[in-house]
Image: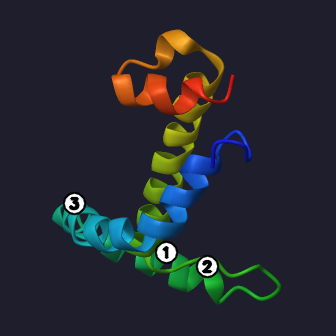
Amino acid sequence: ILKGEQDAATQYLKRTTGDQLSTKFEPIIGNALESVNATKYYSDVTTTYNKIPFVEPVETDLTAYVNNLAIEGLFKLVAEEELKIRKDPISRTTDLLKKVFGYQE
């Protein structure tokens, strides 16, 4: 992880926790979307759209779509923080970060 890609730790976290996070996020996202009827309206629109000939079908499950974007966005932010920690010693705000990422220099 230390000598790998600039986002190696993030990739590891995504690989080992991504599915669990997705499972935890899904009901929260689903409830939020349901509370404003977004899933119904989105499903109606995308189902109709997908019936149009020669168009590339779009995802009709809004909860799954938003959940996927949320997970991707989360790990994008984590990767950005990891890069800061790797490149800037000032970003290593804990003793553990200083110890672990100090070895790479």
Q: How far apart are marks 3 and 1 (CA)?
A: 19 Å
Of the 4 image quadrants, the one containing the C terminus is: top right
Point 61% across, 79% down: residue:
49
Residue 91 in the image: above or below residue 50: above
Residue 3 in the image: above or below residue 84: below
Q: Which of 36 and 14 is in front in this view?
A: 14
Horizontal placement of 78 versus 63: left or right?
right
Outermost residue, right side: 54
Label drawn at residue 94 = none
Q: How many C-alpha atoms fall within 10 Å of the one at disc 1: few (<14), some, or many (≥20)?
A: few
| CB atoms of marks 3 and 1 within 8 Å | no
Hey, which quadrant is residue 40 in on the image? bottom left
Outermost residue, top side: 90
Name which residue type carries label 2. Answer: Tyr
Residue underneath mark 2: 49
Name which residue type carries label 3. Answer: Ala
Label drawn at residue 45 = 1
Q: Where is residue 2 in the image (x, y as percent from the top left)?
A: 64, 42
Hey, which quadrant is residue 104 in on the image? top right
Q: Where is residue 56 in the image (x, y as percent from the top left)?
A: 76, 79
Q: Nearer the viewer, residue 90 or 75?
A: 90
